[in-house]
Amino acid sequence: MTDLERRYLRLLRAYPAEYRRSRGAEIVGTYLDLAAPNRRWPSLADAADLLGGGLRQRVRATGATDLMPGVRLAAAVALLTATALAGVWVVLELRPAPPGFGEPSVGPFVSLGMVTWVGWLLAAAAQALTPGRWRRRAVAVALLLTVALVPAAALTGLPRPPLFVLVPQVGLGLVALGASREWSGWLRVTPLVAAVTGLAFAATSSSSSFAWSYRAPSGVLTLQSAAMVVLAVAVLFGAGLALRGDLRGGWALLILLTPLGLLALHPLAEALDGVPSAFLPSWRALAATAVLVVLVSPALLPVALAVRARLASPSKPGPTWNAPR
């Protein structure tokens, strides 16, 4: 057995044991036939394909065939929310404090966040203008820019958006990576429309507090409003689809619970901290609430899958495996 075959077999553990016994040799043999000569490690594309196929097969074994459509629905909602928020934050970045107020800034911008928010606007444009394979890459780049803000600010000493703004954006971006690459024409422009809507809404805002700082009341309210809109959309979609016997809306709601909780971090932390709504919660309450959201919300999905598996018929055959192209 070669090193390459051994490593493919390790990746094959992503599939259920019964599936590995019946199809494992065929799957590994196909990948070995397609591998370049003298290759010792599976390519990243092959590894992602095997891990993704194993995950899909495990999900199919539970009978939750509507989970992947639910993932795509949740990704679409997350992408629209992320790009709309980016439009709002771009306007805030363009409103630094006047000289003499003692507020730090980065040239004409409030913080380093301007680079990230422009990245999200470009990702929205990429959804409408680029081929399918580039759309997910554009979202991944915007997500990496969001994560990179924290070390970049630490290294340069320049201001950045607070974590309660960045963490929900990361949560939305991770979910948005599951968006379908085969959107129809009018769906492709919806992220760009959402971004322009966010820009227009913030630009026409008459609130003088929507400037200088993300910690202003209007900045916190923006996140809470986004959480309420996402929740309303997810619930309406879920209820409407459930009436037709389609459960993908329910799966989408479960997947969106994590970014939803992060968007609503302030009211949740206020409840945990026991402070009146007129005061901001402590950073400890915010951190503890974020940890709870990140731990508890994703755990509900495997619980739901386990329940679905118990209800699924054990005799129901799964779809056949498709060889890699």
Image (spheres, rainbow, N blue to C red):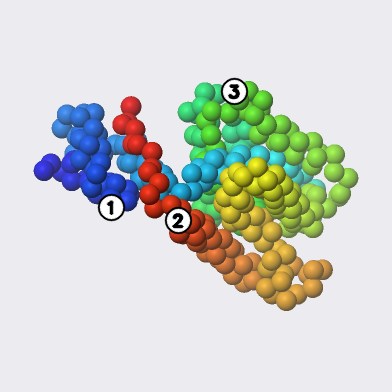
* Residue drawn at the location 62% of the way across and 45% of the way down: 245
- Circle number at residue 309: 2
Nearer-the-camera pick, 35 or 277: 35
As drawn, the label of residue 268 is none
Vertical arrangement, residue 120 with respect to residue 216, above or below: above
Q: For the residue carrying disc 3, how many other residues have a C-alpha within 10 Å: few (<14), some (14-19), or many (20+)?
A: few
User: Which residue sits at x=49%, y=60%?
Assistant: 307
Q: Quadrant of the C terminus?
A: top left
Q: Is 319 displayed left or right of 241 in the figure?
A: left
Q: Is residue 251 visible?
A: yes
Amino acid tagged 3: Leu
- SS category of the residue bearing label 3: helix
Q: CA distance from mark 2 to mark 1?
A: 16 Å
Q: Is residue 152 visible?
A: no
Query: Amino acid type of disc 1?
Result: Ala
Residue at 26 percent of width and 47 percent of height: 20
Q: Earlier in the sequence, mark 3 or mark 1?
A: 1
**Of callouts 2 and 1, the N-terminal one:** 1
Q: Which residue is mark 3?
A: 129
Viewer-nearest of labels 2 and 1? 2
Residue furthest left in the image: 1
Q: Position of residue 213 (x, y in %)?
A: 74, 53
The amino acid type of the residue labelled 2 equals: Ala
Identity of the residue furthest to the right in this view:
206
Residue 17, labelled with which disc?
A: 1
Q: Nearer the viewer, mark 3 or mark 1?
A: 1
Q: CA separation, marks 3 and 2?
A: 40 Å
Judging depth in this view, the residue of 210 and 74 nearest the camera is 74
Vertical order, 73 against 212 (above or below): above
